[in-house]
Amino acid sequence: MSVEKSLLGKDTAYPTEYQPDILFPIQRAPSRSAYSDVAGVVQGQDWWHVFELSWLNSYGLPQVAIGRLTLPATSPNLIESKSLKLYFNSLNFTRFASTEQLIETVEKDLSKAAEAKVTLSLIDANHLSVSEPQGICLDQQQPSTLSEHPDASLLKLDADAPIIEEQFYSNLLRSNCPVTGQPDWGTLFIRYHGKKPCLESLLAYIISYRQHNGFHEQCVEQIFADIWQILQPEKLMVYAAYTRRGGLDINPCRVSDLDWLPSAPVRLARQ
């Protein structure tokens, strides 16, 4: 379905009755067509945290939790975020006999929209731990060349290019929603095995997304594909921990090798 037909960027009444048909799938294939030779763009997970998750128990008493959704990168569709927010709002006044019934209902509805198995786990509202980013921070590098839009030609190998295995991260990832133009902020992690990249060029490339219009998942896949094709590492992971908007945060991760897929998403302070 075309994103222009979604509710994104439009004034919308918040539903007070269960409304699974409000979920809006967006096909992944069109944005992936430019990277059809890069297998890693379809390997990984999208993790979502749902901070405004509430429903009624069998007695009509409100319940709250933090939800963690896991959506496979192999799914034909991603789910547009505003429709997901509205869907969870539609559960606020819906009675469920048990948390198991809630989970079963949500998984069924989201799996139908994504056309793949989506899982939901519930976390106590006070028990989502915060982690420190791990790896080498790129943010003190001083790139000599900057671009206002994604430019893969910025990526360079280090002068002597020894083989390394390291994780880099930057808090400077910024892109824009392709429909509303609202900024999306995130911390980008790059786990890398191969000839050492020039760190200034890697940061310049990340910064070049600051005026780019793209969904979170699409940005991560483009970054993965560009690094894979230009720098040609032996193994690669690209993971973005985006800050929340509308009570949701999105954490897409793409890997060249499934043994580099994290067992769970990180949780950073500014999310």
Image (cartoon, rainbow, N blue to C red):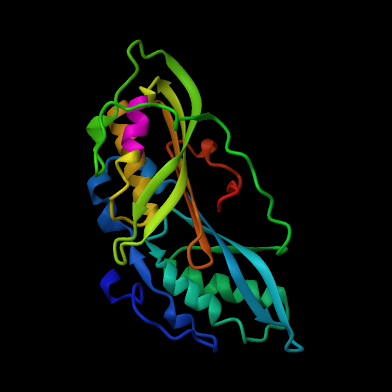
Q: Which stretch appears magenta?
A: 200-206
Q: Position of residue 160 (x, y in %)?
A: 35, 10
Q: Quadrant of residue 11?
A: bottom left
Q: Nearer the viewer, residue 6 or 172?
A: 172
Q: Residue at x 25, y 35 (%)?
A: 152
Image quadrant where one finds the N terminus: bottom left
Helix, strand or loop: magenta stretch: helix
In the figure, 249 relative to 2: above or below? above
Say if residue 44 shows up in the picture.
no
Where is residue 39 drawn, in percent x and y?
35, 41
Q: Is residue 209 magenta?
A: no
Using the image, determine if residue 239 lies above or below residue 145.
below
Q: Is residue 204 magenta?
A: yes
Residue 239 at x, y = what percent? 47, 43
Does residue 51 appear left or right of residue 224 in this picture?
Answer: right
Q: Residue furthest right?
A: 59
**View extreme (top): residue:** 160
Question: For this rendering, which residue is in front, 114 or 89?
Answer: 89
